[in-house]
Amino acid sequence: MDKNLYVVLMAGGVGTRFWPYSRNNKPKQFLDVLGIGKTLLQSSYERFLPLCPPENIYVVTNEEHESLTREQLPALAPHQVLTESMRKNTAPCIAYASHKIQKLNPDAVVVVSPADHLILNEGDFQQTIVKCLEKAKDQDKLITLGIKPTRPETGYGYIQYLDGKQTLKKVKTFTEKPELALAKTFLQSGDFVWNAGIFVWGVKAILQAFQKYLPEMAEVFDEAASQFNSTNEKQALQAAYAQTKSISIDYGVMEKADNVYVWLSSFAWSDLGSWNSLYDNSSKDENNNAISAEAMIYETRNSVIKGPKDTLIVAQGLNGYLIGAFDNVFIVCEKDKEELFRRFVNDLKTNPNGNDYL
């Protein structure tokens, strides 16, 4: 266990592609998505307990989910839950947490991880983090974890790396979610990995990168940081977020910096970003249906059936569908049509009563 290791769990997303299971009042990181008795946030928190003191784990979430975070992780002290007043993507969130940690430990090495991903064989994951920690201690590398691809996946970003003998490779390019033909090319080339969105770096290294590649954001947070850990912190943070543009850490820093490395990882990983990914990681019946509901199923295959125990779902003659009952929403939709879920949510936002269903 390393006292200089800190963990930042990003728990501020809304999981639009997982609607209507993931809702504004309870996004997917707060849900027991796989039916294992723990939410994704709780699983993420427990994953890091063997690696660092529990007081070194921080959660960044939207202020409307602060009480839910504390309810699910009661061991966290008040200062370990960092709240955002508005969603501005990952760069401001990381800037905020980095300044908080730097004040406590200028030599800190930080792991930044989404709170809603699935990681199997956690021992392999923890060994990977320990190895990356050693590489990041010199405070001059920005490390991201890459997952060796097993299929031409179009739902993930890709990282191309420069060849070398070590497992830690210099990054050549980042590519956002590609079309299928390009994903097949990436898989065949052998020098691309999936971008897991999990980072390891020294706190000095990432704050220097902000100053170099996002100077306006760095200036805003440098000023706000003087009020952190005081009664004026919330006010200073709100002012900082109001002045900050919405941008991801990938676009803002990682794609521009010249000291970015990728660790080639082999642990089983999924971002659980869609109904298709949930289907892929769920147990299935003899007709390849992933069923988590009271259900009567006839001539139906390759589908997800999900709902509460007090609601009976009867399905017949469907192939490759999501059939779900979630509070006040019932949905029947082809599960592969990931882009439609964003459309459903956007259409509801223009509906006078739409917020009742989001």
Image: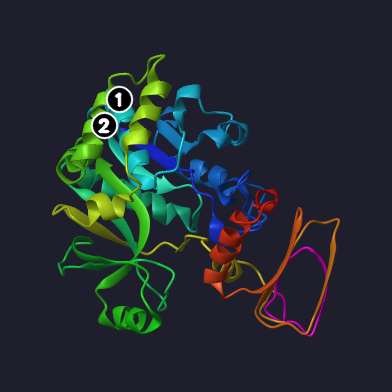
Give me the residue at 21% from left, 56% from top. 261
- Magenta-span inclusion, residue 47: no
What percent of the width, then of the height, locates residue 211?
Answer: 17, 39
Density class for disc 2 (Cα within 10 Å; few <14, some 14-19, many ≥20) is some
Judge left or right: residue 225 versus residue 24: left
Q: Which mark is residue 220?
A: 2
Q: Can residue 277 be seen at all in this image of the molecule?
A: yes
Query: Where 113 falls versus 322 (above or below)?
Result: above
The amino acid at mark 2 is Val
Query: Where 72 falls versus 266 (above or below)?
Result: above
Give the magenta-colored segment's residue range.
285-300
Judge left or right: residue 131 versus residue 47: left
Tell me the quarter of the image containing the N terminus.
top left
Q: Which mark is residue 224?
A: 1
Judge left or right: residue 75 versus residue 32: left
What percent of the width, then of the height, locates residue 341?
Answer: 58, 65
Give me the residue at 16% from left, 66% from top. 165
Q: Residues at badges 2 and 1 in contact (C-beta under 8 Å)?
A: yes
